[in-house]
Amino acid sequence: MAYVMFADGRHISRGPLPISGGPAWISSERFTIDAKLESPQSQEMMRGPMLQALLEERFHLKVHRETREIPVYELTLARGGLKLKGFQEGSCVPIDFLNLRMSTLESLAPDVHYCRNAGSEEGGIVTYEAQGTSIDAFAKIVLGNLDRPVINKTRVRGLFDVHLQYAPERADPAPGVSGPAGPSIFTALQQQLGLKLVPAKGPGEFLVIDSVERPSEN
């Protein structure tokens, strides 16, 4: 799954690609990586190419990306059409969440009024609010925490303001709670935004482990 949630315009959290293959111990064993840099590096460099090189050297890790047909949701327009409010230009500065990098976050000016993109939960209800977001960004980022990837099939362009409230599904509901406190995200999307999730088949990207070994002692 992939999900980005901004509470203050500067915090980012993304899930990794689904992993396929590899021995069972990669999911149960834990390792501590202690590495020293010869010169200062950006977070993107350390968490990307440098970490990959370290894993290839110490764990003999070899991977490749692979696209497979998997269950997905197609995001379409619900009966009655779109209910989203168009973004008012100049009200805030939008952030391109689909192409967001750590360096972009680090360069955000503290005196600029960036568009809000945040979520919170209270009383079993999730409230998500965004300004100046596209349907593509909403589908891939906000709906990326569902049990299937979401593919935008609306063909709607432009930026919108989003206000969505729904009750998330619970694998282990709290004792004494008989049912959800509000509409499911499927119902909320139709009633509040004029969007609909339709089960379908589509492409899904995986990170496939070709080979990996436990690291030798230092």
Image: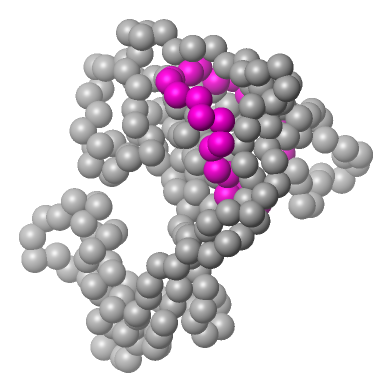
Q: Across the whole image, how many numbered discs are drawn on residues? A: 0
Residue 126 in sight: no
49 relative to 174, above or below: below
For the magenta stretch, what is the residue range? Answer: 145-168
Q: Residue at x 70, y 47 (%)?
A: 199
Q: Quadrant of residue 6?
A: top left
Q: Is residue 85 left or right of residue 192?
A: left
Give the image location of residue 117, x and y in percent.
46, 26
Give the image location of residue 167, x and y in percent.
74, 33
* Foreground residue among 153 and 72: 153
Give the image location of residue 166, x and y in percent.
71, 29
184 relative to 66, above or below: above
Give the image location of residue 44, x and y in percent.
25, 52
* Foreground residue among 24 and 64: 64
Q: Is residue 41 left or right of residue 16?
A: left
Q: Residue at x 25, y 82 (%)?
A: 57
Q: Work out which residue is located at the far left of the displayed protein and give it.
A: 39
Q: Is residue 100 magenta?
A: no
Q: Residue at x 49, y 39 (%)?
A: 141
Q: Is residue 133 left or right of residue 146?
A: left
132 relative to 50, above or below: above
